[in-house]
Amino acid sequence: MTKNNFPSEQSASETVLEDIREYGKYTITNRALPDVRDGLKPVQRLILWSLWTMKRTFKDIPAKCAQVASHTTGNYHPHGEEAAYQSLVNLRWNRYPLVVGAGNFGNPNKLEDPGPAAARYPETKMQEISERFFDDIHVAQMEPNYNNELEQPVVLPSRIPTLLVNGGEGIAMGIATKLPPHNLTEILNAAEALLGNEELELDELLKFVKGPDAGTGVLVSKKKDLVELYATGRGKVAYCCTYDIEDGNRGSKKLVITGKAPGFNGSRFLKETLLLKDKKLILAPANDESSLETGTRITIEYKDPQVVRERLLPLLNTSVSYQMYSLDPDGNPRLYGLKGMLQDWLDFRRDIDQKVLRARAVELRKKIATEVVRLKAIRQIDDVVEVVKTATTVKAALAKLCVLLDVEEWQAEIVLNTQLRSLMRMTAADLKSKIRELKTNLKQVKADLKDIDGVVLRSIQEIRDKYGDARGTRLRKSLDDLQDEGETSYFIGALSKGSKVESFTEPPIKSKASWPYADFIRSEGEILVVQEDNTVHVANVSYLDKLDLSRANVVGLASSKHSFSVVVVSRRGKYVCFSPDQKRKSFNAFRGLASKDRIFQAVGVKEGEEVYVCFENGECEQLDLSTVTRPNVKPRRVRKEIGKVRAVVVRGDGDVLIGTETLSEETVASIGNKSVWRVGQENMVIEASSGKRTVKSQEEVLDLLEKGTKPSLIVDLD
């Protein structure tokens, strides 16, 4: 019977565990995790290396994807061709694509990506930005491939912080990594700042890096969540799909998804729309009109906005959990934060640029020595010719030239290998000029070696100027973010109780929490100002101070960006509902306003909100907002002979009364003179006692009211 080969002191289970550890280490370092230096996993690095060796750069003709995949797996990465092809496809859909995709590579814009064609059909080559991985390839560390026949790079000397700008994901034994993509300009700005001051704290870096940038959707995470991700390397980031509301057929509306957020589940969304259509709650299920040329466009036709608000809009909100694992410069897995990842990449660039400069210095010294020996040779050209004529062997000629010109043997060999015709054409003046130029270049290289950070900085600026772009994932800024950044993309239009209109970059705060403003709106550009005499004026923030509002009191404001429609109500219960997106600068709210009637109030209404009009006799009635018309049309009447209007109330999801009572249809009639607050996902709360301003979530606001705390004001920041 054959004995097993296990050592007596090691059991079979211990041997298996040891082998599993070895296999796990191999999987982590050679398959699953990207390297912090070039930001690539091995298969991605070797795909680019294959394209480089195959001479399929950006200016060359493309190759079949099947050829690239087989070249990669056959020569460098001995794994399945299908896996290599899928990695190649993923490089095409990076935030900054590393390969060109000619043919069917799938379409991530669609609700459900159909996936790429078979590898034998599409073609590919390197993107221009990918060539920046090979600018310094001559100093890259090389290693033998799996069968020791070819060489492959250990890591590519990338001039781009690929791991941060393109992100990445992978899974191995015990470790899973998922890194978000970012905007190249933001990352390089942060890298430049850190290069100038290594003591920068995370908060300083986050002034440059606003958050992940997948190129689509809206980033809705609060700053504290982003701080947690970038400080610890782990965190959850919230996104939302971008969408618009368009007019449909016969009074219907269309929800139009214009950008898919990271983590958006298209299959789940499609199933939900099919279910709603079966129940006749919407007019048609999701219609995918997306294409690579026009981007994402997914439409859903409906009539009841409440169904869309409650059943579909929540599906557009997503969250993605990130774990920023990567291989450090020593090849060990590490959980990175933002600063650590930037610091290691900068150290990598310092090392690469030092190697490039040292190699350049060696090359320049050799060129200088070459030109010096040529100068000596033409000064003694007759003696050089005599040596060549009389020498019996090459070795003898080299020995005589070394003595004659006082140079080393390799320099003498240059003279010996130079054609006599070329040597006679050279002049001392030309050679002296060339030597001076080479020495000047060498002096600059030596200076750069002493200021390596300056070299890295110039490289960062060059890459940013050439490849930097605008952020693709939009930001939903909270008030805290705006205060930290010292800037804002919108302004607050405020209406005082004396009918004066003012504008602010943030809501005005007065001492002891006094609030002299009756209404306000948030706007990114233009606002609509409605006056008591039925006139409407459209103005931007720079024009508000010049707007002549002396003819009548201002009774309402609306945003042309943040409002779905504008509802204008007269004192006798007539109303119109029109779009806030008006090209005219001044117009009437509605036609046929009686001489004894005046405009009572104008409000901007979001999609899905409800408007109630309350009369002096205590009765309330909901307005029909199903039809949005043009302004200056014949108004509709709420109810005949019901008396004068006392209040106009806008109700949306989360709105509350002062106190603990939630506003519902049953309680609208009993509003009386109480105030109604709109409570959104994010809210600014002004404390009644101290005037302190804080940003709270909808849940926190409701909890605040349940405890009996009565703030001076709650502002919906959504």
Image (cartoon, helix red, strand yellow):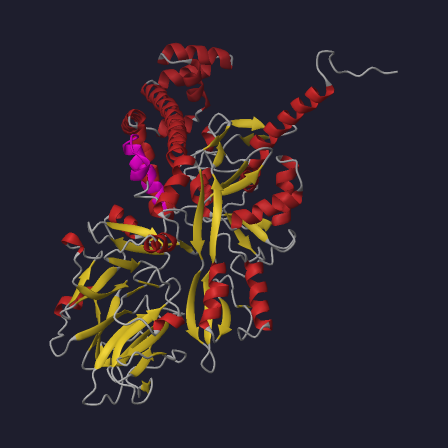
Is 485 situated left or right of 280 in this image?
left
| Residue at 36% over, 22% down | 365
Q: Quadrant of residue 196?
A: top left
Is 13 situated left or right of 313 in this image?
right
Q: Position of residue 205 (x, y in %)?
A: 32, 39
| Residue at 32% over, 89% down | 640
Is 400 situated left or right of 65 in this image?
left
The reply to whether the magenta stretch includes residue 110 is no
Q: Position of residue 377 (x, y in %)?
A: 36, 20
The reply to whether the magenta stretch includes residue 192 is yes
20 or 668: which is nearer to us? Answer: 668
Q: In the picture shown, does residue 236 fall above or below 30?
A: below
Secondary structure mostly taken by the magenta-highlighted segment of the chain: helix
Q: Which residues are magenta?
A: 185-204
Q: Position of residue 634 (x, y in %)?
A: 31, 88
Q: Quadrant of the C terminus?
A: bottom left
Q: Position of residue 154 (x, y in %)?
A: 52, 30
Q: Quadrant of the N terminus?
A: top right
Q: In the picture shown, does residue 295 fall above or below 470?
A: below
| Residue at 41% over, 79% down | 626
